[in-house]
Image: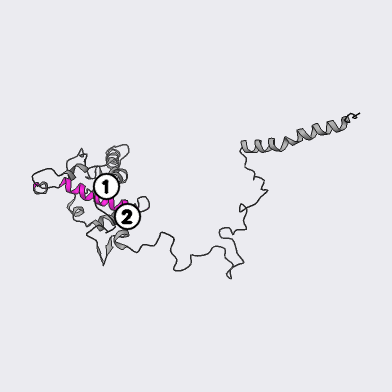
Amino acid sequence: MISAVPKPLIYLAITAVFLAFVPPALIARVRAMNSDARRIHLVQDMDNQASIRAQAPNPLFRDGRGARPPVGGTVARGGLRTDDHLHIGFVDGRWVDTFPPSIEVDRALVERGRERYDIYCAICHGYAGYGDGMVHRRAMELVNNPAIGNETQWVQPRSLHDPAVRSQSPGEIFNTITNGRNTMAGYQAQVPVRDRWAIVAYVRALQRSQNARQADLGGTRPESLDLFNLRQSDQEPQQ
């Protein structure tokens, strides 16, 4: 005959079962709630390293400084720029008159340039390039407002059809986009180098479209002109 299980043992087993649910419940609660407290690390992996904080001392080096200068002669991966034609637009002491050999000047490049121009340039220079973009129009409203524009000075963005701009080489235009000029800021940080050349191609096409001669058309409308799809300015072209 099997004897009955003692009640204390039954109570102990029930308690153990309930206690077994406590860790999963705590884990579920922690995962579902946000907390500023550091989580418990049972396995440290690389979460807590003995790293040196900025400007903190480091006995590993002879000078005791934790902040180390870059090793002389090193270049960040992808940062080596040996093609001055591509990255600077300046070769043998002068601005280049051609596009870099690695840049294929085709319809796709001009289309890309138009897209980038509309994003970064048209706001000041206008869609047709006459320096009458939305920034200029808004500035003129403020300047002409007696309550706001008292003695306020504003310099209109340069027209891309100005003879002085039209005479610039592709390399000089690329440099202006990269580093800026006068009151214009540079766009090196915002626009990748190949996109800057694409903008140069579109600016050249924009200048050609607004200053074309009958002889340039050859008696017919070239298909290449369709890719400009220019939106004319509300203002008359500057003379």
Q: Is 195 in the magenta? A: yes
Residue 105 or residue 90, whichever sits in front: 105
- For mark 1, give the secondary structure: helix
Q: Principal SS element in the magenta part?
A: helix
Crowd rating for badge 2 (residues with CA inside 10 Å; few <14, some 14–19, many 20+): many
Residue 27 or residue 202, whichever sits in front: 27
Give the number of the mark in front: 2 or 1.
1
Q: Position of residue 172 (x, y in %)?
A: 25, 57
Q: Is residue 155 visible?
A: no
- Residue 195 to residue 17: above or below: below
- Residue 15 to residue 100: above or below: above
Residue at image position (16%, 45%) is: 210
| Residue 179 lies in quadrant | bottom left
Residue 130 or residue 146, whichever sits in front: 130
Which residue was labeled with disc 2?
Answer: 178
Q: Is 38 in the magenta? A: no
Q: Which mark is residue 161?
A: none
The alpha-carbon separation of the residues under discs 2 and 1 comes to 21 Å
Magenta-highlighted residues = 189-214
| Residue 29 lies in quadrant | top right
Which residue was labeled with disc 1?
Answer: 108
The mark nearer the N terminus, 2 or 1, is: 1
Q: Position of residue 71 (x, y in %)?
A: 48, 67
Crowd rating for badge 1 (residues with CA inside 10 Å; few <14, some 14–19, many 20+): few
Numbered label tally: 2
Q: Residue furthest bottom?
A: 62
Q: Position of residue 133 (x, y in %)?
A: 26, 42
Q: Which quarter shows the N terminus? A: top right
- For mark 2, give the secondary structure: helix
- Residue 188 to residue 230: above or below: below
